[in-house]
Amino acid sequence: MRITKRSAIRPRRLLDRMMQGETASKEPLLLKPRSVVVRQSSAVSAIEDPIVSLAMSMIREHACNGLQARDVADRSPVSRSVLQRRFRAILGRSVHEEIVRVQLRKAEELLRDTDLSLRTVAEKAGFKHQEYMGAVFKTRLGMTPRSISQALPNRPRRGDRRIEQSC
């Protein structure tokens, strides 16, 4: 969590009083998180179909590295059509839609937590072109990446520590 000036004031004041010999309250000091980010390790899916589960793992690991639906199918022990049918039956979306969903989630995370340019966000999220990322945002979220990044209240500014996660 990025600590903002406002969220650091209460703990800082408490520490100052404690250093001057004042006894701290027994009540815990609770700070509201800015957001919760579900990481791959905490988002273990309970997909019983081993083939769909394998495909999901591959997508989570490689979606931001140019992975395409045919790559997932090529590494699957079943045909592309069988994989697509099973994938859609279990998850309600295609392999391609899942890849784009993961890329979109990564792009949103980068927009929220970094001050990277839109071109760099697109590249790191696995979109070949910034324009395609913009079209996906507009279609799926009804907003452009720029309007989303400008609407975020606690977005880092140039010079702030950057937080970058792998896909």
Image (cartoon, rainbow, N blue to C red):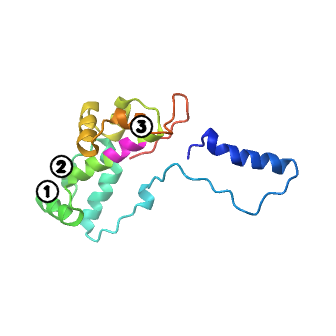
In front here: 166 or 151? 151
Residue located 32% across and 49% down the image? 102
The disc, 1 or 2, on the residue closer to the chain's N-terminal end is: 2
Three-letter code for the amino acid on which mark 1 is drawn: Arg
**Residue 132, image x, y percentages:** 24, 35
In front here: 41 or 113? 113
**Residue 87, image x, y percentages:** 20, 62
Residue topped by disc 2: 70
Say the numbered circle drawn on residue 151: 3
Q: Quadrant of residue 5?
A: top right
Three-letter code for the amino acid on which mark 2 is drawn: Arg
Residue topped by disc 1: 80
Q: Element at badge 2? A: helix
The disc, 3 or 1, on the residue closer to the chain's N-terminal end is: 1
The magenta segment is 104-109
In front here: 135 or 126? 135
Measured Cα–Cα span from mark 3 to mark 2: 36 Å
Q: Quadrant of residue 48?
A: bottom left
Q: Element at badge 1? A: helix
